[in-house]
Image (tube, rainbow, N blue to C red):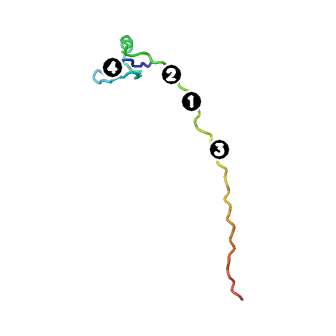
Amino acid sequence: MTYRVVRPFPLSLDGLTLIDLDIGDERSEWGGMEDGLVAEGYIELAPVVEPAPVVDAAPVVEPAPVVEPVAAPRQQETRRRRGR
């Protein structure tokens, strides 16, 4: 279960390291202190938010039409023939 902080306070789960919790922070690990913190008014049960349905966000892309290259018109060779 996830709880939300309603009054800021420092929390120590291991007895050595302090974690400063601010209003609105949400946690699911409280080291068994949930009942006492709720009774003292430091935390409350966070509302369960249903995740939004997953929508296939990949747009459908139509393939571009294949355009065949147009050959450039052949230029006539302009050779002079030597008179024979």
The three-letter amino acid code for the residue at tag 1 is Val
In this view, the residue in front, 46 or 16, is 46
Residue 66: x and y in percent read: 66, 52
Q: Earlier in the sequence, mark 4 or mark 1?
A: 4
Q: Check disc 4 and report the residue beneath it.
A: 9
Q: Residue at 44% x, 19% y: name it.
A: 2
Determine whether the residue tagged by mark 3 lies in a helix, strand or loop: loop
Task: Tell me if 49 is positioned left or right of 35 in this view.
Answer: right
Q: Which residue is mark 1?
A: 54
Whole-angstrom CA distance, mark 2 to mark 4, is 25 Å
Marked residue nearer the N-terminal end (3 or 1) = 1
Q: Nearer the viewer, mark 4 or mark 1?
A: 4
Mark closest to the chain's N terminus, 3 or 4: 4
Q: Residues within 10 Å of mark 4 (few under 14, many from 20)?
A: some
Mark 1 falls on what kind of element?
Answer: loop
User: Which quadrant holds residue 75?
Assistant: bottom right
Q: Residue at x 39, y 17 (%)?
A: 6
Q: Callout 3: few (<14), some (14-19), or many (20+) C-alpha neighbours within 10 Å?
A: few
Q: Position of residue 58 (x, y in %)?
A: 58, 38
Q: Nearer the viewer, residue 14 or 64?
A: 64
Per the rendering, the mark at residue 49 is: 2
- Label located before the other in sequence (3 or 2): 2
Label 3 to label 1, Cα distance in Å? Answer: 23 Å
- Quadrant of the frame with the N terminus: top left
Q: Calculate the distance from the C-alpha at mark 2 to the C-alpha at mark 1.
A: 15 Å
Measure how far apart labels 3 and 4 are at the Cα level: 56 Å
